[in-house]
Amino acid sequence: EEIQTSDDVVRGTNDDATVSRLSAVNLRYFQDPFVKLFVKRPIRRSPIINRGTFIRSYAIDSIVSQFLNIPGPKKQIVALGAGFDTRYFNIKAGILNHKGNTLSENLATYFEVDFSEITMKKAMMIKKRKELCSLLADSDQVKIGRGGMDLLSKDYSILGGDLRNWSDIANRLMEAGLDLELPTLFISECVFIYISPEESNTILKWITDNMKNTMFTLYEQIKPDDAFGKMMIRNLKSRDIELKGLQAFPDLTHQEKRFKDLGWQIAKVVDINTIHDKYLERSEIMRISKLEILDELEEWHLLSAHYCVAWAVNSIDFVQEFNSVQ
Ligand code: SAM
């Protein structure tokens, strides 16, 4: 039997996320025609997990689409630990839009970083499937680099590497065309939690030190210390998964402070209950409540209190736009 390293275990969380996404898509919580290409064995998740996946996706998608919709120059997105995230394809296909307006013409380049074991599989799938490949701006000029670990193209690049070696990743992003002047949104969707606070701070500080018009959005677990949090940690530990950022940023206020301390002008953090109760449209709540019966309301509220969405801005150009997610 192969020995699993702790990095293998972390990489395995990508399959969990992708399977959950497909489960929610198959039940019509949201649309994503591409995610099924990345799942070998679909599994139907519980109503609580499906609803959580929907709200996580809704929150990040809404930040992404508001960002791309800001008037001005074309924009970049950098997805850290992107895994099999399909957001680029959904933007290009017009499925992710802003109140019906397509966003792809506002996108300069979409960069993704993940361990090379993951980027290799993703790059291969993209080369193989026309429905993916044809969405790239220059689908006939896609370059595969570093023995299959990188994919480089005009408006989409995937880089294989370790976020804990940020100076290497930053250099390779710039080689791949990251423009330090253009407005740029960084995404960490369930990723920073797996690296140490020092390692994630290095990335956040590099961004404010080197770029002028940036946004960051993050989604991850909080509240390790109450009974539910302890159970959450125990369950993950039984699968050898360690959430390294959890003790350093245990609450909404700590999450906010992590950005402010490193030079971000605005930092807002809310939990999933708040997204559900305050930001999600009533019609959407009605719609999803008809998809599946969710009996375990108490458990749903507990789980939702243990995940947060953060967004931070460091820019003179678009500070005002981001006092809320809509
Ligand atoms: N962001 C994707 C999503 O939300 O569907 C994937 C989330 S998955 C829970 C965590 C991802 O972070 C995995 O794909 C994993 O390989 C990646 N990751 C974790 N630590 C990393 C590191 N040090 N360097 C590169 N990628 C990392």
Image (cartoon, rainbow, N blue to C red):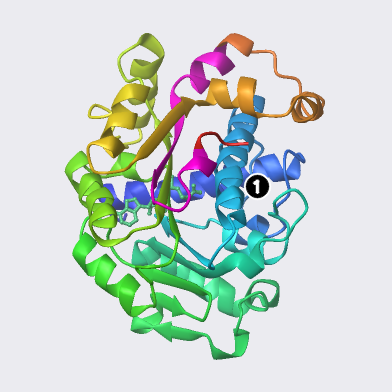
The residue that disc 1 covers is 22
Q: Is the residue 199 above or below the residue 235 in the image?
A: below
Q: Is residue 306 magenta?
A: yes
Q: Quadrant of residue 261?
A: top left
Residue placed at 44% from the left, 22% from the top?
Answer: 306
Q: From the viewer's perspective, is 112 left or right of 3?
A: right
Is 204 on the left or on the right of 268, as rendered?
A: left
Residue 291 rendering spot, x and y as whole percentages: 79, 30
For the N terminus, the quadrant is bottom left
Inspect the image, locate mark 1, and give the three-letter code of the amino acid beneath it: Leu
Q: Which quadrant holds residue 164?
A: bottom left
Residue 59 in the image: state x and y as whole percent: 57, 38
Which residue corresponds to the image point at 28% horizontal and 29% vertical from the top-left? Answer: 249
User: Could you say which is closer to the camera, residue 239 or residue 224?
Assistant: 224
Q: Is residue 227 above or below residue 12?
A: above
| Res. 40 visible in picture | no
Residue lying at 60% horizontally and 66% vertically, measured from the top left: 106
From the image, which quarter does the C terminus lie in?
top right
74 or 292, nearer to the observer:
74
- Give whichever of 152, 211 is nearer the camera: 211
In magenta, the rendered stretch is 299-322
- Cβ of mark 1 under 8 Å from ligand 1: the answer is no
Residue 181 in the image, given as x and y percentages of width and height: 37, 68
Q: Residue 298: horizontal and vertical position, in percent?
A: 58, 9
Q: Check if residue 295 falls in the magenta segment.
A: no
Decide which of 5, 167 is in the foreground and name it. Answer: 167
Label 1 environment density (alpha carbons within 10 Å; few <14, some 14–19, many ≥20): many
State whether residue 212 is above or below residue 268.
below
- The local secondary structure at tag 1 comes to helix
Q: Is residue 183 visible?
A: yes
